[in-house]
Amino acid sequence: MKHKPSVTAAIPPFLNSTKEKLFDRLKLPITNITLEPESSEYDACHFQVQNKKIRFRQAKVTPKKIGQFVTLWKRNKAGITEPFDSKDNTDIYIISANQKTQIGYFFFTKQILSEKGILSGKHEGKRGFRIYPSWDTPANKQGLSTKKWQIHYFVELTGKEEDLESISKLLGLQRQ
């Protein structure tokens, strides 16, 4: 069964929290929201903020492994799933990470995801990957190595003005 992306004028409930915590505080409107039903388990959608095309996902806490898991894939013309490509029309991939009272966001550029082999292009790409927010400490070498590069793209929301400065910088946007 095909699930086509659907454009919506209304902000879906899962995105409203992110809108309020990030974009409203930065005085940046979200436009052109398109839901991605096939990845609805990860609250998948894409939208625009100023001139940036953004793809959004909600990561999932996994019961047996440290960190959280998120998917990043699309269907090709033959209907087969494949990783997003570095040539796709997305500038920033925002991954929301929540655990109990902790909330944070990863703001990955397509350049870093391509360099790290998550987007296809230079590499084969991946359909999903593990993220490590500031509150998670991986127990193995690969997890520690992954967290080391990811943490530069992560902002844990603390309610401070510095959060907004960091987010603006990672998004490459001017605050209004």
Image (cartoon, grey):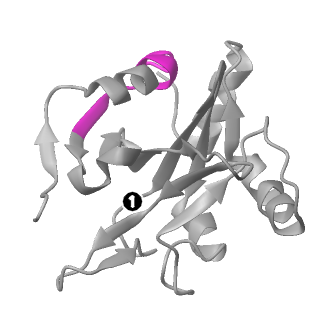
Would residue 127 appear left or right of 78 to someone viewing this image? right
Would residue 51 appear left or right of 104 to someone viewing this image? left
Q: Give the residue at the far front of this rendering.
A: 64
Question: In the displayed structure, would residue 160 be above or below residue 42?
Answer: above
Query: Residue type at mark 1?
Result: Thr
Question: In the displayed structure, would residue 85 be above or below residue 11?
Answer: below
Q: Is residue 44 visible?
A: no
Q: Is residue 11 visible?
A: yes
Residue 81 or 116: which is nearer the viewer?
A: 81
Q: Where residue 48 sits: x, y (%)? A: 32, 42
Question: In the displayed structure, would residue 167 be above or below residue 40?
Answer: above
Q: Magenta stretch? A: 20-32
Is residue 25 highlighted in magenta?
Answer: yes
Q: Where residue 167 sits: x, y (%)? A: 61, 33
Residue 83 or 111: which is nearer the viewer?
A: 83
Count all numbered tags in the image, as a single digit: 1
**Image quadrant where one finds the N terminus:** bottom left
Q: Where residue 40 sits: x, y (%)? A: 30, 46
* Point 54% across, 44% down: residue: 60
Is residue 88 highlighted in magenta?
Answer: no
Q: Where residue 45 sits: x, y (%)? A: 31, 46
* Point 31% across, 69% down: residue: 74
Residue 49 or 42: which is nearer the viewer?
A: 42
Other-residue count near label 1 (Cα within 10 Å), few / some / many at <14 / 14–19 / ≥20:
some
* Point 33% across, 64% down: residue: 89
Residue position for label 1: 90
Secondary structure under badge 1? Answer: loop
* Point 66% across, 23% down: residue: 157
